[in-house]
Amino acid sequence: MLKQEVDTVIAERMVGLVNNNSVIREMFEEGKRLAGIYGAENVFDFSLGNPSVPAPEELNRAVKDILDEEPSIFVHGYMSNAGYEDVRATIADSINRRFGTSFNQSNIIMTVGAAGGMNVIFKTILNPGDEVLTFSPYFVEYNSYVSNYDGKLVAIDPDTETFQANIEDLERKITPKTKALIINNPNNPTGVVYSEETIKKVAAILDAKQKEYGTEIFIVSDEPYRELAYDGVEVPYITKYYNNTIVGYSFSKSLSLPGERIGYLVIPDEVDDAEQMKTAAAIATRVLGFVNAPSLMQRAVARCIDAKCDVDSYNRNREALYNGLVKLGFECIKPQGAFYLFVKSPVPDEKEFCNVAKKHNVLLVPGSSFKCAGYVRIAYCVSYDTIINSLPRFAEIAQEMGLSR
Amino acid sequence: MLKQEVDTVIAERMVGLVNNNSVIREMFEEGKRLAGIYGAENVFDFSLGNPSVPAPEELNRAVKDILDEEPSIFVHGYMSNAGYEDVRATIADSINRRFGTSFNQSNIIMTVGAAGGMNVIFKTILNPGDEVLTFSPYFVEYNSYVSNYDGKLVAIDPDTETFQANIEDLERKITPKTKALIINNPNNPTGVVYSEETIKKVAAILDAKQKEYGTEIFIVSDEPYRELAYDGVEVPYITKYYNNTIVGYSFSKSLSLPGERIGYLVIPDEVDDAEQMKTAAAIATRVLGFVNAPSLMQRAVARCIDAKCDVDSYNRNREALYNGLVKLGFECIKPQGAFYLFVKSPVPDEKEFCNVAKKHNVLLVPGSSFKCAGYVRIAYCVSYDTIINSLPRFAEIAQEMGLSR
């Protein structure tokens, strides 16, 4: 059976993605299959990072008010490719209030979610052959976001002690071709929040390397989980620590709007060649086919810029699942952000762990999907009942895998 | 003064786009500047293809109903990258009802407008060096949509007699590297509707060339203006004439929603390797950073699939402006679609025509912006008053340019 034709109708660059896709798809299908056999309430699907709490009531209220109050041609119409000026000003003000920055509307480019923003910024800055670093474990889509523009993603080895940034390996892997470092804070899949100390160390190294090589190295800070932080931890605003920082934000998690595709880039004036960069990012938004971020949602998020989804629900899940798993003998860093636990596999090959879990109707994602084998990701953005009812299953899994306690 | 640095911070591929952008931007700025001096009502800006009629009332009603009736996590959440299955089924049914096709939901991929859809399909099919043909004059963004994936756009010479397809030049320009032909029907900027006869001729040539070269040549039919057709003219549904046809549609014009970025691709089962193509297009949607078309708008357009904006308003503008201009001695094909007139310049260099018009506070786009010098585009998606009040200005322009009548 031929798995891959030599001569394909689709683009050759898509063939690998299509073949790979089936792996992820299998997990979806498996979840559905199990739910069909055992009932949805007896299947514990921790595979998806899909918000489990509704959008705040203010959001739907804002949408309705906008439709009543603002003219259709304006609300549903084209605006500048970078977004409505008033929306961008509202966002800049909000960032300034919260983080003591001094942005204005010109620093904000509205994007089709964080994924759209990442594509826009890499289109804007990458030349063929440029290298983009990121800390492992990482969201694998970064590979596409970089290779779409003929860049090369270079993974920095994980620090499995703390899952903070591996500073030594970062320093080792910067070359004259390094154009950017992606930081995902809080992190998917570990849930770790990179501390101010970590960020300062990273900034110092990048500053030194920029001087050494006479290049620009940008931090691209991917922050869809910024508002999901617990225990009062602060998520550093990286533009304050390093000039060549570009922030990518999304309302997907903070307002539970992942399907709406609404976010923004921050391009500070401190960035090298900021004016040209801002212009280019707006053009990249247009030519990549986004044209602009969805108009009604731009106006809606501006109206509820201070609203938040029910972060406490996620925190309750985090506490219950983390404590439950540790009690059963599983090893895991207690994460302070996002909605993931990154649990050490009791056996070296975490796919075996995933297979055992699946026998108990518990679906986990292998760490190798995030380029960090030996761990699994548990997305706890599920109902609290699912968390509680899954614990007896995890107990069975622990027993089967020989965990003592 | 250096116009272009040798060593730029932004990607080299963006530099040309940034420099070019200023040309278009100048027109925006000029409009604003003139409005500031003479008052907005005395400036006649025919430069923008932005719908001038509101979205139908059903659309806003649908949005509000959805927010009241459907769960937040569902309405604002992730779904399949290709879109909600029920929305895609509704769209397939609607196309089938109207055009006698037999699509199902698997043939529909929801996209971030037509521009998003074009990027998705070219990501899906183009290998580096592939050629994509299109009939001049054409929407210049096609250059980016193709070059984003390392393809090369090849323009077919215009047939300035009728502005129907130049079949001879199409045949001449097909090579073994030709992967696609973009057809924009109704056409921007001419407003011409390619007839069934034209489409049949095109299909016959492509079929013959596919056989001759043993290649696949796709028609990518870009149809944002499909519903804007006048005089009862029929816009052929090209999948019925040619198997390797992919349709890109947008609700931007039909429902006056350009800012919302909502449209779809149709990938018929008759297309070569259709299954792989459909899978690849969904993946391309994800990896390009669209992830999915905006969720609430997907559900909204499905609820008012049979609604239309006020096409009669555009038609009234068309008649008034066309008749007015012809009476003044201007030459122009009477267009049957979209909301553009493509008027022959009274002098060979149409930029001179644009400059004279600007002196009379009338803003036109030179045809060279659509790779067809000697003509100008007039976007009549403005208020009827603007049309009527502009006619005395056009009379002054005609006189200044020596048009007799």
Image (cartoon, coloured by chain):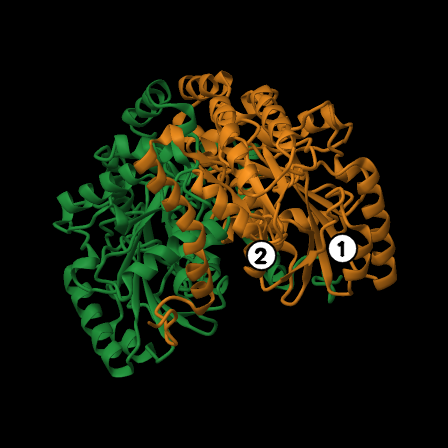
Chain colours: A orange, B green
Determine which residue is flagged by label 1. Answer: A217
Above/below status of B184 relative to A245: below
Q: Which picture quadrant has residue B221?
A: bottom left
Q: Nearer the viewer, residue A299 or B120?
A: B120
Q: Point out which mark residue A115 bears.
A: none
Q: Nearer the viewer, residue B313 or A110?
A: A110
Position of A197 compared to B157: left or right? right
Q: Between disc 2 and disc 1, whose residue precedes?
A: 2
Position of B34 compared to B72: left or right? right
- Residue B122 percent across, percent down from the top left: 41, 61
Q: Point out which mark residue A143 bears.
A: 2
- Residue B232 percent across, percent down from the top left: 14, 45
- Residue A274 percent across, percent down from the top left: 72, 47
Secondary structure of the residue carrying numbered label 1: loop
Which residue is located at x 25 percent, y 83 percent? Answer: B212
Q: Amino acid at mark 2?
A: Asn
| Residue A374 seen from this side | yes
Classed neighbour count for the residue bearing mark 2: other residues with Cα under 10 Å, few (<14), some (14–19), many (≥20): some
- Residue B207 percent across, percent down from the top left: 21, 74
Q: Are marks 2 and 1 on the same chain?
A: yes
Secondary structure of the residue carrying numbered label 2: helix
**Chain letter of the residue beneath label 2 in the structure image:** A
Above/below status of B256 relative to A352: above
Which residue is located at x 55 percent, y 22 percent? Answer: A309
Q: Quadrant of the C terminus of chain A?
A: top right
Which residue is located at x 58 percent, y 47 percent? Answer: A282
Q: Nearer the viewer, residue A87 or A196?
A: A196
Above/below status of B338 relative to B42: below
Q: Quadrant of the N terminus of chain A?
A: bottom left
Above/below status of B25 relative to B276: above
Q: Amino acid at mark 1?
A: Ile
